Image (cartoon, rainbow, N blue to C red):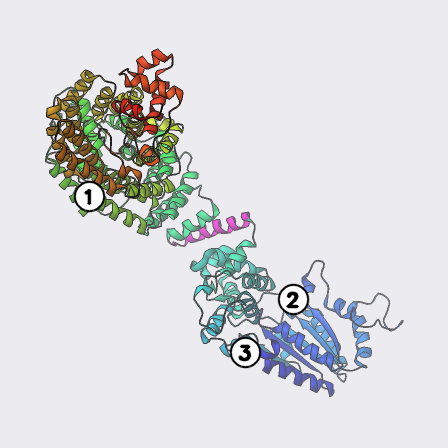
Amino acid sequence: MAFVIRAAEFEALRSAFSRCLHGMSRTILIEGGVGCGKSALLHAITEHAADMGATILSVQGRSTAAHPPISLFQQLVAQVPAPAPGEVPTGATPALQFSAALPHVAENGAVVISVDDVQDIPWSELDFLLQTVSWHRSRRTLILLSHCPHLRHRDQPVKTELLRRPNAQRIHLGPLDERGVRAAVTTRVNRPHEQWIELLHHLSGGSPLLLRALLEDLRDEDMEARPTGAETSAELGMYGRAVVSCLYRSGATAVELGRLVSVLGDSAAPELLSGMTRVSPAVVDQQLEALRNSGILDGTNFRHGSAPREILADLGTLQRNELHRRAAMVQNSAGSPTTEVARHLLAARHAPEAWQRSALRDAAETAIGQENIRLAVRYLELALENSPNSPDRIEIYLRLALITQRISPAATEVRHLTALLSAFHADKMPSTAYDGLADLLFRYGKIQEAFEVLQRQGAESSAADVRAGDHPSIGWLWAWYSHQSARHEGEGQAPRLPPPDDGARSPYASASSLFQSFEGSFLHGERGDWAAAAENLLEVSTLSDSTVWSLSCAIKALVIADRLESAWQWCEWLIKESASRDAPGWQAIFSLQQAMIALRQGKLAASLECIRLVESVITERSTGYACAAEAVLAALHMEMGRYDEVARVFAKPVPPAWEKSVYWLSYLCVRGSFHLATNRPHSALADFLRIGKVAERTLVDHPTLAPWRLYVAQAWLHLGDEEMSARMLAEHTARAPCHGGRTHAMELRLRARLAPPHKRPGLLFRAVDELLATGDRLDQARTLHELATELRGLGHESWAGRAQAAAAHIARNCLPDHAMARTPLPERASRPVPDPASAAGPAGAAGGQKLLTRAEHRVAALVAKGMTNRQVAGRLHITVSTVEQHLTRIYQKLGIGQRADIGKRLKSLPA
């Protein structure tokens, strides 16, 4: 390549050698930056001279700086014949030995002495060589010296001394221009695209060495076509290693500067570099200029990212960390942006001092403003690691917990919230942090613990200060109603907001004070009023760390108000907004809500898709959100008739943390419904009663939020105890506000089961009307099926057929490809989200009847005679649980949903 890209310079050297052959000795200094082709040019001309019969003596200047060093004359003496005995005194130095041998060598023809990297050779040795050659001026000798300017070396007046000597000549090798780059590229590509020439010229800086490395890295690219743009970010290994080689050949100072520029990146400046190296700015400028001439730097930046990566990879971890630590100190002293300081602290994993933690926190806020949450989390986590006993530790934890939920709500709950609670219980938390902790606890369904925090807070601060800007009646929805439930337990109807106490504040004063400024309050006015309030909040709020909880509560309010379609649309928008903001944690929060909404609407496939997204983000099973997700998943499997899948969900061990979360209510609700669906009413009753205890303990015992008394009434009805069922229904009715909607429809269906046959259709018609308004399609189908059954029992076949057809139509729309669409929906009471499946499921309809085992047949025969489960267990000397398990399989095999059908189906079975 040297012949091609340095044709003019090679011709000058060839001409000098021709004159040398005619007895004209010359000294030529080839000058240029590292990697500019000096060595290649020396090699080319010495090969030419050797072909012409000249004697070639080559010296490497770098060898004189090796360990151990090999001097100039040691290298030369090794290449010439030893002088004759007596020609030099015993013990003569290599310099004298070479001086004596040179005339004998020159007798055989021209001599070419090639010295590469002459700047590394002591001037005393080089001066003696020049003197030796001058003593034999009549001999045909050509001295070729390559020299790299601007590099710090020892005692080197090379250029000045050489150029003032007779017969001396200087050849300067500058960076290649685009024409030179094109000439090099055309040795490999016939017609390279002009943009490739421009790109290669920029990346190589005109350095032949770097250009060769680039051509090697990009050898598989089609250079006759336009570059795609990916080349600027591609990993160029040969190029990076070539840059490292150039730095090492440029000396220790150049190597250090290269490392510092790699660390500083775009913020590299001569002043900062001087401060980090403790080298004068003048010397730094000189070294930078040399690196620019070598094509390595463009200003104070590397031309491609592969170079700094390769340079830093060449260092050990401790060396890199030390460079970043020094960079952070220098940039902080220079007043650089905290983002630059924090970047180096993060790379060094070092922030023990207060100013360093302050820089990390400031940089985290900047990153949050730029939507780079993952970087902000890394900054805050480093500040936390380095503040074991600092007073700002709790503040960092709170901020970290708030923003981490964008990425992983599970990480917030498991790591940060746990640590904050530990600090709270150990009395290591300042009272100013109580509001923030209570807010986080409410977000993650830890209602009881949130009130413990507010109780200790007392009159020191107001939650209204922290929640400024949020809609109060939505932001603390569950908190307020748990407060109302606790204070007014036993009253017939939930009261309106009481006036504030003039005396001592109650444990819930912080929560209740939030509602004083709001006319009316949730669940006490008309449903349209608080649904409108929720819609208003959603319309005027921007999704952010401080509003995501309020927006989530607004969605809950719409669901409670039975505005399912509106809630679905808002969830859809918030999920898309979260995705565009790279916030998978927010996506999971709103997807979980959307899954619950879709379940009520009968969009089972969409609900399952939402749950899959939640599971991909919330992978830690011990969290409250995981509890809610598994509850919805189990309900979905039930609706789809996948009872084996439901059993697998409930067979998993229950993490202890679930039982402290309000989401535990949903899990118990679905598990109890599964017990009912599989004819285990005793187990269902236990779960439903437990919901009441948990609701009371977590202060959410409100009939609109947790109508557990309706579930208990349903379980008693399955057990045949209508008196207990009616009592629980009356308790619920006395406490429930008269809002109508889905919960009221649940109540009407239970009342219908307890009413005389001629009154049941009227109650069920009212329930259907309520459900039509709410959009609960699966409950509509079930209620219509119950209505058809009752109408048929009263002899209204035409009306019964219409009701049954409507139920089937809804079922087909919910799962058009599933057996459920062809199976009559059995009796089942509605519940809040999530819903369990029908009692029989599709297994029987889809797969046909199966023969019962002998044990199952005995149980079925006794049940058909009207015996209860306990009576059957006593007759057969087995446990009630075993009877329930047999009944589950009997229901599935016979494709039925209630005990009354067992006798009819047994008669149709083969003997």
Q: Give the label, 3 or 1, closer to the camera.
A: 1
Q: Secondary structure at mark 3?
A: helix
Identify the amino acid type marked 3: Ala
Query: Secondary structure of the magenta portion, mostly?
Result: helix
Other-residue count near label 1 (Cα within 10 Å), few / some / many at <14 / 14–19 / ≥20: some
Q: Position of residue 890 (x, y in %)?
A: 34, 25
The quarter holding residue 406 reads top left
Query: To which residue does mark 2 refer?
Result: 120
Whether residue 469 is visible here, answered yes or no, is no
| In-image side of 435 versus 318 (left or right) | left
Q: Most extreme residue toward the bottom, as rendered? A: 22
Residue type at tag 2: Asp
- At label 2, counting other C-alpha atoms closer than 10 Å, the crowd grade (few under 14, some 14-19, many 20 or more) is many
Residue at image mark 1? 565
1 vs 2, front mark: 1
Q: Are marks 2 and 3 in contact (CB under 8 Å)?
A: no
Nearer to us in this view, 715 or 860: 860
Residue highlighted by disc 3: 183
The image quarter in which residue 886 lies: top left
Q: Quadrant of residue 101?
A: bottom right
Q: Which residues are magenta?
A: 317-336
Question: In the image shown, does 173 or 288 lie closer to the viewer?
Answer: 173
Cα–Cα span, label 1 and label 2: 81 Å
Q: Is residue 582 left or right of residue 282?
A: left
